[in-house]
Amino acid sequence: MKISYNWLKDFLNIDLDAERVGEILTDLGLEVEGIENYESIKGGLEGVVVGKVLTCEKHANADRLKVTTVDLGNGEPVQIVCGAPNVEAGQLVPVATVGTTLHTIKGESFKINKGKIRGEVSMGMICAEDELGLGESHEGIMVLEEGIEPGTPAGDIFELYSDHVFEIGLTPNRADAMSHLGVARDLYAGLLQLEETKKKLNTPSVSDFHVDERTYNIKVEVEDSELVPRYCGITITDLKIQDSPSWMQNRLRAIGLSPINNVVDITNYVLHELGQPLHAFDADKIKKDKVRVRTLPTGTKFTTLDGVERELHEEDIMICDGDSNPMCIGGVFGGIKSGVTEETTSIFLESAYFDPISIRKTAKRHGLNTDASFRFERGIDPNTVEYALQRAAILIAEFAEGKIVSDIIDFYPNKIEDHQIRLSYERAFRLIGEEISTDTIKNILASLDIRIDSQTESGLGLTVPAYRVDVTREADVVEEILRVYGYNNVEIPEKIKTSVETSPGLNPEKVDMVTSEFLISNGIYESMSNSLTRPDYSSLSESITEDRNVTILNALSKDLSVMRQSMLFGLLESTAYNLNRKSSNFRLFEFGNTYHKYDSGYVENKHLALVFTGNRAGDHWGLQSQASDFFYMKGVVAGLLERLGVKGTRYGKMKNDMISEGLAIYFGKKKLVEFGVVKPGILKSFGIKQEVLFADFDWAHVMESIEGSQIKVEELPKHPEVKRDLALLLDEEVSFVDLHDFAKQAERKLLKQVDLFDVYLGDKLPEGKKSYALSFILQDKSKTLTDKQIDKIMKKLQQGFEREFKAELR
């Protein structure tokens, strides 16, 4: 949000540096993200002076050029070659001296250098108005009025406007600060606390408001007072549509608005001055001299000011004429047929308070974000509705020469009341962290328009104005006191008091922290994805169905219209983003929730997800590249479970249709994690051309398995392990998991570990076959194994593989 410093000075008589004001606003919670220097003429005509043309002769080598001598007021006339047809001796003209940078009306910039034009030296340039940024004409040079001394800076004779513009990062809760008045109120409170001002806040006066004659009354009918709690209007005739005054145009341009005409500019001016959106209708286009505020059936066609035909929703607030023809989407956007044009002579000026929720839904449905909807959907001041209308009517009467020909129509059946809050000093001090003077508290509240109704030794009874929609609780009042008092003024205690946390069960936050530390120490970066995602991702997996999507009612866009059912797609978006920026080696992890809609209700599950792609490290002359492959991910997953103390897990088949090759790890019957290679078809949907691995932990099951795992302390074995290998020729459909589980069942006592250390698929093998090389670790804790025992176990395993899997020993 852009705020003009000059405009703020209308409300506050201050002369502080813009940087100092920015610091105060930031301390008050209105974060100033930047300060721009605005100039109505870029460059401020620096280096441009008034010159007097002493002589003007035809150029010897060019028919259309003239050679002039110009007095620049320094006693040394200069020669300037000029191509303008209207240059003559005796004229006073604007001259850009050598070294000056000019900024044209089209935004182009060029520097004036000493040079030769067709053999004649030229020491500057006599300027046309478009070259100075003062207008659009390029028919000839500007000729100034007589009586100006040569050498006078051009900036002294033209109406130049400069300003400092604050870019404020406004938080959504601060609806009261969406105007210059709102920002000035906060700044005033801050200055009072800092004792940098003792003057009062100035607000625009409407004491001059009066009805000229009561000859044109447009009636108003509001059908639903819940959707439209307050609606005001007034009729103004005999208008002259023309440009608004230059001071108003400058202020609008400074905050990024383009002037249109006096009436439209005034409605925009009052909007940014007071925070109250207004809308002007051409009164001659309002049929039956009646405005009906109502809703229309779903599917009704309506063309807005941008020329787009839109289909209305039955909940959209519409401003209609007497025949119920729509003229405007209330609080959002005007219609193409009812607005102010150059032919307009009479207007109906609207000022209203619309239901914030309704406006937000309408704006999102139609994909519109206007200055009006931005304010209405956050909540404006219902008590400014009439005041802003009077302010605009006065300005229109002055600058469009209009006549106010009706009383203000004010539909306000149920007044929106201020908030009543009780403030306890004790609770306030506890939240603030120190005791501050009760007089200071009272002064701060008074500066914020919070009225003190009653006082006791223990606290205050307060009335908070309706425009402070974010101050509804005692804690909110304390926050207001603290931000004006100054967070930096709260002393840091010398002692930090804390208590030792005692918890009978597992601490979820601690488990998350241990997990994060383990993954980060392994070079895996934490990622955070939006839990809102695209509905068409459900087409990429049979396990993620469209009917289980949790849909957002007021979605910001189609790409953010449902809650995610899987952690994979957000991480793939991050992967694609990084790959597109030439970052091809990285590993990410993310804690997050998935959301599902079932017949029994909504379900929310916590997950930990990992994504690996590329190599484990970047290219280096001293290191051989190692891919972040399946086995690397398997090691990280297993290492994490071991770090968390999960014991007694087993590998099993996974049932994830988004992973082409992978495994699952179980604790009893609970599946803890699935991991493997993401299917190429899914990667193609994200434009990813390299292999990506994905692991998905069901965090609830992980937490249960941690609680269910008992830490066992065992004596180190005194007798050695024995390792034996088998190379088996197998059918392609036989998996390592099948072999692993069979071996564990066949020899439960002495077989400690089974590993797959080589896989071969090649032309030398029969069709449909593959070769696995397995290692087996055997150990007896009570004695050293003999060759006879070892051979017996290996023979049993070999015969079992041959019998169950038709394996052949290679």
Image: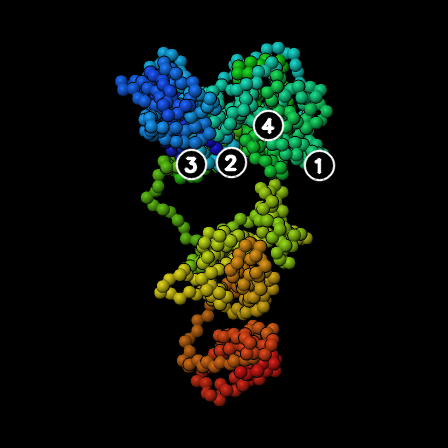
| Contact, mark 3 vs mark 2 (Cβ under 8 Å) | no
Disc 4 vs disc 3: which is toward the camera? 3
Hey, what amino acid is under mark 1? Gly
- Secondary element at image label 1: loop
Q: Is residue 751 visible?
A: no
Mark 4 to mark 1: distance in Å? 25 Å
Residue name at image x 48 percent, y 60 percent: 613
Residue of label 4? 353
Where residue 450 is drawn, which disc sits there?
Answer: none
| Contact, mark 4 vs mark 3 (Cβ under 8 Å) | no
Residue of label 1? 299
Residue name at image x 68 percent, y 28 percent: 326
Give whichever of 771, 179 is nearer the camera: 771
Residue name at image x 33 percent, y 16 percent: 54
Residue of label 3? 33
- Secondary element at image label 2: loop
Q: Tell me where residue 189 appears, x and y as whole percent.
A: 42, 27
Residue of label 2? 173
Hey, what amino acid is under mark 2? Asn
Extreme left residue here? 75
Q: Tell me where residue 164 appears, x and y as whole percent.
A: 40, 28
Q: Tell me where residue 609 appears, x and y as whole percent.
A: 52, 57
Disc 4 vs disc 1: which is toward the camera? 1
Disc 3 vs disc 1: which is toward the camera? 1
Hey, what amino acid is under mark 4? Tyr
Mark 2 Cα shell of 10 Å, populated few (<14), some (14-19), many (≥20)? few
- Secondary element at image label 4: strand
